[in-house]
Amino acid sequence: MKNTGTTVTILRFWSQIPIWIKAISIGVIVSSVGSFAWPIVGVIIPAPWSILIMGILLWIYVKYFRGNWWPKATAEFRKMGFRSIKMPRAAWKWSLFSALLIVTIWQSGLIVTFRIIEFPGDEFTAGYKLAPMPIWIAWLMIIMSSLVAGICEETGYRGYMQVPLESRYGPVVAISLVSILFLIVHLQQVWARPLLLHLFVLGVLLGILAYISGSLIPGIIAHFGLDIFNFSYWWTDIAGQYDHRPVSETGIDVHFIVWGLIFLISVLLFFWAIRMTKAARGEEIAHSVSG
C-alpha cells in the first residue's frame, strides 16, 4: 500500500509539471543517453571493437525508443516520441530529397560564410584530433560518430522534445523552441561560436522536415550526412583541408559565386521539396479516408 501511495504521489506531481518542462527534460535525457555512451565506450574499448559495440548499443537504443520491449505501458508514448509512422512512397522520395538538400545547405553555407569571414581552423579542429590509426579505422570512427549524433540528437530533439510541444503549442513554437535549445546545447563546442545563426537555421530545417514528413528517419539521414562532412573535412583533415581566403582579400571570384548560387538554389529547392512531401502525405491520408 505504501508503494502504491508513493507511486500515485509521483504521478500526480508529474502531471502538474508544465508540458514544456517535461518535453525539454525528456528530450535532453533521451539524446544524452546515446550521445554520452559513445565516448565512454571509446575510452573503455579500443577501436575497432568499440565501433562494433557502439553499433549494437545504437541498435538497442533505436529499438527501445521507437516503442519495443518492456514496459508495455510506455510503448505507445515511445512510438509517438520516435514518430514511428508508415510513410507513403512518394513522401519518402521527397523527404529524402529534402534531407539531401539540408546537407547541401549546411555545407555550402559554411563555404560561403568562410569566404566572407576568415575560417577559424584552429578552433574548428580543437578537440577532434584523431590519434594515429589506419585510415579505414579513422573513417569507421567518423561514420559511427556521425551515426550517434544523427540518431540520438534527432530522437531526443526532433522526436521526444518536439512532438509533445507540437501537440501543445503548435509547430511554429515547437520548432523554434527546440532549435534554440539545439543551439544552446552546441555552445560548448568551440567551433560553434561563429555559427550561431547557422545552428539555429539547421535546427529549424530539421524540425520542419520532421514535422512535415512525420518521421525522424529523413532527419537522421540528413544529420548523419552533414556530420560525415563535418568530421572528415571541417573538424579533421581526412577528406582534405579548407584553404580559401575571404573575398575581402581575393575579391569576388568564381568559387564564391558558384557556392553562393548552390546555397540559394538549395534553400529554394528545400522548401519546394517540403511542399511536395506535405502534398504526398496529404494525398495518402485522403486516399485512406476515402477508401
Image: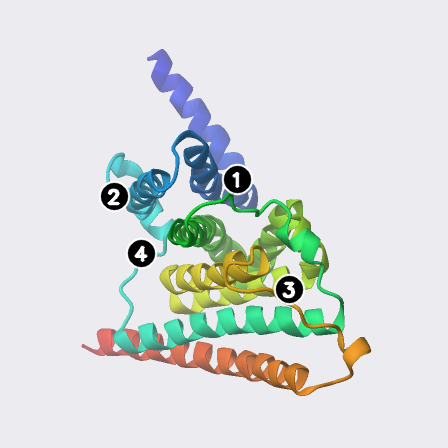
Closest to the camera, between mark 1 and mark 3, is 3
**Dot 3 surroundings within 10 Å: few (below 14), some, or many (20 or more)?**
some
**Is label 1 in a helix, a strand or a loop?**
helix
Q: Residues within 10 Å of mark 2 (few under 14, many from 20)?
A: some
Residue at the disc numbered 1:
25
Q: Residue at x 48, y 40 (%)?
A: 32
- Quarter of the rendering containing residue 249: bottom right
Q: How far is the residue under mark 2 from the one under mark 3?
A: 35 Å
State the residue position of label 2.
Answer: 68
Write the residue at 40% across / 81% down. 276
Q: Quadrant of residue 251?
A: bottom right
Give the mark nearer the N terminus: 2 vs 3.
Answer: 2
Marks 1 and 4, the one that precedes in the sequence: 1
Q: Secondary structure at mark 2?
A: loop
Q: Are marks 2 and 4 in contact (CB under 8 Å)?
A: no
Question: Between marks 1 and 4, how big is the CA–CA gap?
Answer: 21 Å
x and y, in percent, of residue 86 in the image? 26, 64
Mark 1 and mark 4 in contact? Answer it, CB < 8 Å.
Answer: no
Disc on the earlier residue, 2 or 1: 1
Mark 4 lies on residue:
84
Q: Mark 2 vs mark 4: which is more N-terminal?
A: 2
Tell me what residue is drawn at x 23 percent, y 74 percent. 288
Report, in whole angstroms, how far the alpha carbon at label 2 lies from the one at label 4.
11 Å
Q: Earlier in the sequence, mark 4 or mark 3?
A: 4
